[in-house]
Image: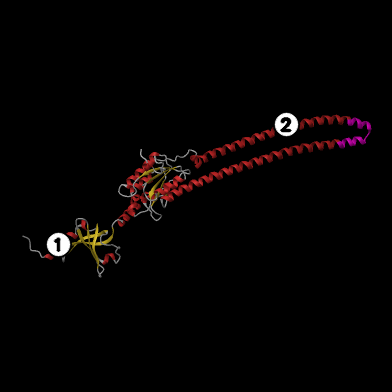
Amino acid sequence: MSDILTVTKLNSYIKSLIEQDHNLYDIVVEGEISGFRLYPSGHAYFTVKDSQSSIKCVYFRGYHKGNIPKIENGDNVLIYGSIGVYTARGEYQFYVRNLEKSGFGLLARKFEELKAKLKKEGLFEPEHKKKLPDIVNKIGVVSGMQAAGFKDMIKILKGELFDVIIKNSRVQGKEAAGEIVAGIKALNEDGRVDVIIIGRGGGSIEDLWPFNEEIVARAVFESKIPVISAVGHEIDILISDMVADIRAETPTAAAEMLVRQKRELRKRLSDLKRHLIRMLENNLLIRKKELQHFSIRRLSKLLMSVVSEKRYQLINHRRILLSSPKSMLENYRMRLTNASVGLMKTEKTFNELNMKLDDLRQSLQRYMLENLKEKKDTVDRLKMKLNLLSPMNIISKGYSLTTDEKGKLIKDVGQVKK
């Protein structure tokens, strides 16, 4: 039989066994706080429990230094510390080194850990961000159809005549992350949409947590289609925002961003059309002036040449006339003969110039017509592209106002059955 122990020795031995166990040294326990009391000494005593058991806790002032979170009995908390034994009573208890409300603190830690991991892998780097296409017609939306902000976003998009493909998913809870990932992958496999919006309205960090899950972050990063993350309010920054190609403050802001881009594109096309028409008008005016200037210049030069020649002949005739009549008549006869020949040559030259002028005029007209046709074809092609984006093009296909057997207008698919 072993030696008889005192109570103090027994409790001290048990204390040494417990406090030397590394599994009980640096641990985190979650439970409901009860019987919280802060003594004048600055030490806090309370119990943490679950549905089946409880453990006494002490939070010495030297650890919290007067900075204890605002908690009430019944709050779920996380306590960080070690198990020890209070030998005077033979009680084991939890010696707390840090305390925080359950949920936020743990999630915040998970957020920072995943953020650091993905940043190290380069998922946030700008070179991986895909740009939105210049023309967006079809938009994929991954969200809950009853989620806050969803209806406003869809209303704005359809009001601008966007085609919207919706992948309904839960946006909070344990199953939400998997459904969001499935929606992103389905839209990529479908291949019809130009951009994907994932998101929901505001909420607590627990509500928004699916958008902080690693599987969602990697699905966004691996998407071949640009992804807009539109989660919560402007102040909420989530992992999906950091990985996404574009971050919008809210779902409504994401819709307004795409509407603004479409209107700017429509304005650029309209400006381009006006610019082309103005260029064509200016080009035609320049060609018309060139034709007029060319014709007048050639005719003026020809007339000056004829007048100069006739003036020279007149001077010669006058000189002959002042000399002897016989030589005058002889010279006059020669000059008259030469003049006749010259006039015939002049007439021939004039006719040739007229023919050349006609040829030049026809060539210029052909050039102008061909140039005008080419510019008109360019404008027609731009009109055709513009018409594809025109709301009137879609409106021309018609609308249907559908009523039930009582004549009541059907506004939602839920009002009818197959």
Q: Determine the residue positioned at 82% across, 36% down.
A: 309
Start and end of the magenta stretch? 314-332
Q: Is residue 323 left or right of residue 207?
A: right
Q: Badge 2, how many Cα within 10 Å: few under 14, some, many 20+? A: few
Disc 2: which residue: 355
Q: Report the magenta stretch's main SS.
A: helix
Q: In the current view of this chain or complex, which residue is farthest to the bottom?
A: 40
Residue 105 image offset from top left, x and y in percent:
31, 57
Q: Amino acid at mark 2?
A: Met
319 falls in the magenta region: yes
Q: Amino acid at mark 1?
A: Tyr
Q: Determine the residue positioned at 79% across, 30% down.
A: 345
Numbered badge on residue 381 = none
Q: Is residue 104 left or right of residue 45?
A: right
Q: CA distance from mark 2 to mark 1?
A: 128 Å
Kindly indicate the quadrant of the structure image that contains residue 181.
top left
Task: Give the camera-side residue of 26 and 414.
Answer: 414
Kindly indicate the quadrant of the structure image that contains residue 102.
bottom left
Task: Give the camera-side residue of 193 and 358.
Answer: 193
Q: Badge 1, how many Cα within 10 Å: few under 14, some, many 20+? A: some
Residue 322 image offset from top left, x and y in percent:
92, 36
Disc 1: which residue: 13
